[in-house]
Amino acid sequence: MMANNDAPHKIAHMSEAVDAGESARAEVYALLSSLFYQAPTKELLHVIATASVICNDGSVSDFCLAWRALQQAAAQADAEAVKDEFDAAFIGTGRQPVMLYGSFYVAGFLHEKPLAYLRDDLTKMGLARRGDRHESEDHVSALCDVMRFLIAGDADTPPAALDLQRDFFRRHLQPWHAQLSAAVISANQTDFYKHVAQLLREFFAVENTAFDMG
């Protein structure tokens, strides 16, 4: 699976079994998946800047502070400049300045054993990479999309049990997401994406805590 880029702020085929809290979780994963798959459009930047559903209770949690900082950055951003930033940071010429693949952070190289373990787990869940996607399954965008799917399901598949969500997160995202966030935040090429990385870091911290309590 890869990101559904038509649904960064609207989960397509959301299962009716998903309550409001779970829907919000799925939408954050969908947004992160979209933002790390490709640069946001002008429309998406506007959606982020004006969204009023997330953190609308005045919370000053680290996650909400990161969300509001991203909203402010989106309100001030130029879509073309953000696209140039995305290309410079995550595509580049030759080796990308910032890698977005789990195997790189866990094993030091691309296409290593962590990717093989991930593919085994995806096969057991009946999931596979879409044929029109070139990124390997350990790309952060793909992993966020899998988490979105596990939480929300779709028209044919109910949401996954919390234990499965927890196991997937802790096997395939927790071991390296902090390194990814740090790499994006410290990169010379990033500006808008520093805020995206901060949101990812704080959201995953919330997820990890919630899994401990679940």
Image: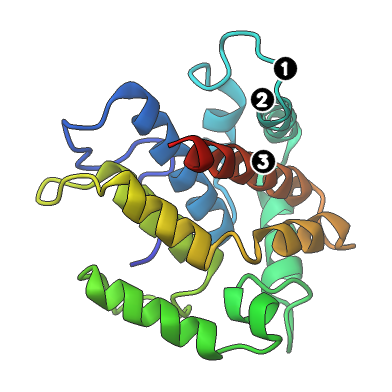
x 52%, y 89%: residue:
113
Discs 3, 1 touching: Cβ within 8 Å: no
Drawn side of residue 140 relative to residue 65, left or right: left
Q: Quadrant of the N terminus?
A: bottom left
Q: Which mark is residue 199?
A: 3
In the figure, 141 relative to 7: above or below? below
Displayed quadrant of residue 68: top right
Q: Position of residue 206 (x, y in %)?
A: 59, 37
From this view, report whether residue 72 is shown above or below residue 107: above
Q: Which mark is residue 64?
A: 2
Neighbourhood count class around disc 2 (C-alpha, 10 Å): few under 14, some 14–19, many 20 upward = some
Quarter of image, res 3: bottom left
Question: Mark 1 — residue?
Answer: 60
Of 119 and 163, which appears nearest the observer? 163
Q: Position of residue 49 (x, y in %)?
A: 62, 26
Residue 76's disc is: none
Element type at marker 3? helix
Asked whether 89 or 173 is in front, the reply is 173
- Gap in Å between the C-alphas at discs 2 and 3? 9 Å
Single out the residue that lies furthest toward the top. 57
Residue type pointed to by label 1: Val
Q: Is residue 8 above or below residue 172?
A: above
Q: Position of residue 37 (x, y in %)?
A: 52, 61
Please, what secondary structure does the residue beneath circle 2 have?
Answer: helix
| Colour style of the rendered protein structure | rainbow
Left or right, 95 with respect to 213, comes to right
Q: How far apart in space, not on screen, are marks 3 and 1 (Cα)?
A: 14 Å
Among the two numbered marks 3 and 1 on one chain, the one whose residue lies closer to the N terminus: 1
Which residue lies at the image location 82% right of the left edge and 54% below the top edge?
185
**Is the residue under label 2 in contact with that under label 1 (CB below 8 Å)?**
yes
User: Is residue 202 shown above or below 149?
Assistant: above
